[in-house]
C-alpha cells in the first residue's frame, strides 16, 4: 500500500461521503487540501514550533458566524497534513491509519460547522 497524498485525499473524501446529508451539503462549500507538511506561516500564526504537532487545520469562518452581509469572503479550507498524521499513527500504534485520517477530517470540518475544540472533545474523547 502506497501511503501518498492521493491515498490521504481518497480517504478524506470517503470520510466526507459518510457525513449525514445536511452536513455533506455544508461541507461541499469547503475546499479540502492535503499536503505533506503545514506551511511555516501557519505554524507561526498558531504559535506551533513543531510541525508534527499540526495534523489538520480549518481556515475560514464557521457557518454559525457567516452572514449574508459578508463581502466576498475567502473560501473556507480544511488542510490535512500527511507527515504529522503518519507520525502520530506510527507513534500510537493502536489505531488504523484510515481511522486517524477520518478523525482529523471530521475534527476540522466540525470547526466549519461551528464547533470549538472543547465541544468536539466533549463528544469525541479521542485522546483518552
Image (cartoon, helix red, strand yellow):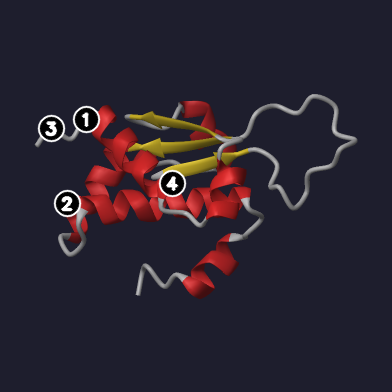
Q: From where the camera sits, is residue 54 visible?
A: no
What residue is shown at x 62% (from left), y 59% (from top)? 115
Which of disc 4 and disc 1 is earlier in sequence? 1
Contact, mark 3 vs mark 1 (Cβ under 8 Å): yes
On the image, the x and y values in percent for residue 77 come to 56, 34
10 Å crowding of disc 1: few (<14), some (14-19), many (20+) = few
Tell me the distance, in whole angstroms, between the alpha carbons under discs 3 and 4.
Answer: 21 Å
Tell me the distance, in whole angstroms, between the alpha carbons under discs 1 and 4.
Answer: 19 Å
Between 27 and 120, the residue placed more toward the observer is 27
Between 114 and 39, the residue placed more toward the observer is 114
Tell me the distance, in whole angstroms, between the alpha carbons under discs 2 and 3.
Answer: 15 Å
Which of disc 3 and disc 2 is earlier in sequence? 3
> Is residue 14 shown above or below 22?
above
The residue mark sitting in front, 3 or 4, is: 4
What residue is shown at x 24% (from left), y 34% (from top)? 7
SS under mark 1: loop
Left/right placement of residue 119 relative to residue 57 reads right
Left/right placement of residue 93 relative to residue 37 reads left
Where, by quadrant of the figure, is residue 74 drawn? top right
Q: Which residue is mark 2?
A: 90
Which of disc 2 and disc 4 is earlier in sequence? 4
Tell me the distance, in whole angstroms, between the alpha carbons under discs 1 and 2.
Answer: 15 Å
10 Å crowding of disc 2: few (<14), some (14-19), many (20+) = few
On the image, the x and y values in percent for residue 123 come to 50, 73
Which of disc 4 and disc 3 is earlier in sequence? 3
Q: Which residue is mark 3?
A: 2
Q: Which residue is mark 4?
A: 16
Amino acid at each position: 500500500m502506497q501511503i501518498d497524498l492521493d491515498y490521504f485525499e481518497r480517504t478524506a473524501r470517503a470520510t466526507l461521503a459518510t457525513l449525514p446529508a445536511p452536513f455533506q451539503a455544508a461541507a461541499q462549500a469547503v475546499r479540502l487540501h492535503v499536503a505533506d507538511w503545514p506551511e511555516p506561516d501557519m505554524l507561526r500564526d498558531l504559535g506551533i514550533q513543531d510541525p508534527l504537532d499540526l495534523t489538520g487545520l480549518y481556515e475560514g469562518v464557521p457557518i454559525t458566524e457567516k452572514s449574508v452581509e459578508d463581502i466576498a469572503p475567502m473560501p473556507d479550507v480544511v488542510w490535512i497534513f500527511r507527515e504529522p498524521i503518519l507520525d502520530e499513527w506510527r507513534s500510537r500504534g493502536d489505531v488504523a491509519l484510515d481511522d486517524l485520517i477520518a478523525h482529523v477530517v471530521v475534527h476540522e470540518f466540525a470547526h466549519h460547522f461551528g464547533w470549538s475544540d472543547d465541544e468536539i472533545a466533549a463528544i469525541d474523547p479521542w485522546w483518552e
